[in-house]
Image (tube, helix red, strand yellow):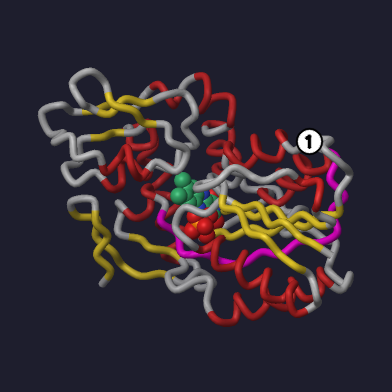
Amino acid sequence: MKCLIIYYSLTNSTSQVAKSISIGLNQAGVETTLCNIKDDSPPNLDSYDLLGIGTPVYVYQIPINVLECIESLSKVKKIRSFAFLTYGTYAWNAGEFLKNTMLKSGFDIQGWFYCHGADYFLGYISRGCFASPGHPNADDLAKAQKFGYDMGSGNADRLWPESHISPPLIYRFEQMMLSRSLVQRYHQKQFKLDKEKCIRCDICVKGCPVHNLNHDNEGYPSWDSKCIMCLSCEMHCPREAIKSPMSTAMMNPIMNYNVKKIMRDPKIEKSKVRLHNGKIEIY
Ligand SMILES: Cc1cc2nc3c(=O)[nH]c(=O)nc-3n(C[C@H](O)[C@H](O)[C@H](O)COP(=O)(O)O)c2cc1C
C-alpha cells in the first residue's frame, strides 16, 4: 500500500506530526511520501491508495491555501484518507471545517489526529504570550506515530476533534471577521508598508509561505492576492515597517481578551516572549 501525506506547515509543528505519522505507517508496512505545500506542489494521486491531509489551525479555521489544495484535489478519485491538525490554544470547530471541505471534495475519511503545536501567532507573540511552547512534544509525537500505525492497519478513529463544540461568541466573531471571503476581498489589500522604515532586506518576500510578496519597481515589497493571513511578513520584519489588518486598533480588544484568557487557562502551557527586530526572544 502507498500513502501520500499532503500538509502545510510554516513553523514546523505540523511537519513533525506528519513525519511521526509516516513512521507509524511505515511500521504497518505502508510506503509513505510527504509533501509540504509550502515547498512543493502535490504529486498526482493516481498511484496512491491512502491520502493524509495535515494542517495547522488558523483563526479557528483552516488556512486558505489548505482549503484550496483540498478543493484542487477534488473528485480526482474517491480515495481513502485521514486528516490531522495542530493547534496552539483552541481549535474549536476547525476540525469540522476541515471535515466538511474534505467530504465536499469527495474524500472517504477514515480517521483523524490532532495535538498542540507551538503557537507563533503574531497577535499573541507581540503581546508577550507564546502558547504551547515545546509542542508537539515526545508524547504528542508518540501518539501521532501510533495513529499512523493504526491508520496503516485500518484501526483509526472516525470521530472528529471538538466538532461538537461551538465556539463562544467572541471567537465566532473572529472567525467571521477573518473568513476566507473577507480575507480575499478585503483584508489582504490592507497591508501597509512604511517606506521610511523599510530597508528592502527581502526577509518578508522570502519568508512568505505562499509566495504572495513581490518587489515593486523600487524594490519595496508588494502584496499579491493569495494571502493566507499567516502574518509572517509582519512578524519577521526587522524594522517593524509592515502593518497587517490584524494589527489595527480595532483588533486590539479581541487580541487582549484572547491573551488574558490564555494566560488564565491552566490547561494551556505558555512562556513569556518578546518580539524584537523581527526575532522572538523567549524568557
Ligand atoms: C495566523 C495564525 C493563526 C492561528 N490561529 C490559531 C487558532 O485559531 N487556534 C489555535 O489553537 N491555534 C492557532 N494558531 C496556532 C497554530 O495552529 C499552531 O501553532 C500550529 O501548530 C502551527 O503549525 P505549523 O508549525 O506546522 O505551521 C495560529 C497560528 C497562526 C500563525
Q: Quadrant of the C terminus?
A: bottom left
Q: How many marks are shown on the rendered structure?
A: 1
| Residue depicted at x 45% and y 43% | 209
User: Percent position (x, y) of residue 76?
Assistant: 82, 37
> In the figure, is residue 76 to the left or right of 227?
right
| Residue depicted at x 36% and y 31% | 213
Q: Quadrant of the N terminus?
A: bottom right
Q: Amino acid at mark 1?
A: Ser
Direction front: furthest residue: 47
> In the figure, is residue 137 to the left or right of 282?
right
Q: Is residue 217 above or below residue 278?
A: above
Please give the residue where the numbered disc 1 appears in the rendered image.
74
Numbered range of the magenta stretch: 106-120
> In the figure, is residue 243 to the left or right of 134?
left
| Residue depicted at x 60% and y 68% | 19
Q: Is residue 201 above or below residue 149?
A: above
Q: Is residue 143 above or below residue 11?
A: below
| Residue 260 seen | yes
User: Percent position (x, y) of residue 127?
Assistant: 31, 53
User: Percent position (x, y) of residue 58?
Assistant: 54, 46
Circle 1 SS class: loop
Q: Is residue 69 a member of the stretch shown in magenta?
A: no
Label 1 residue near ligand 1, CB within 8 Å: no
Q: Is residue 279 above or below residue 188?
A: below
The secondary structure that dominates the magenta segment is: strand
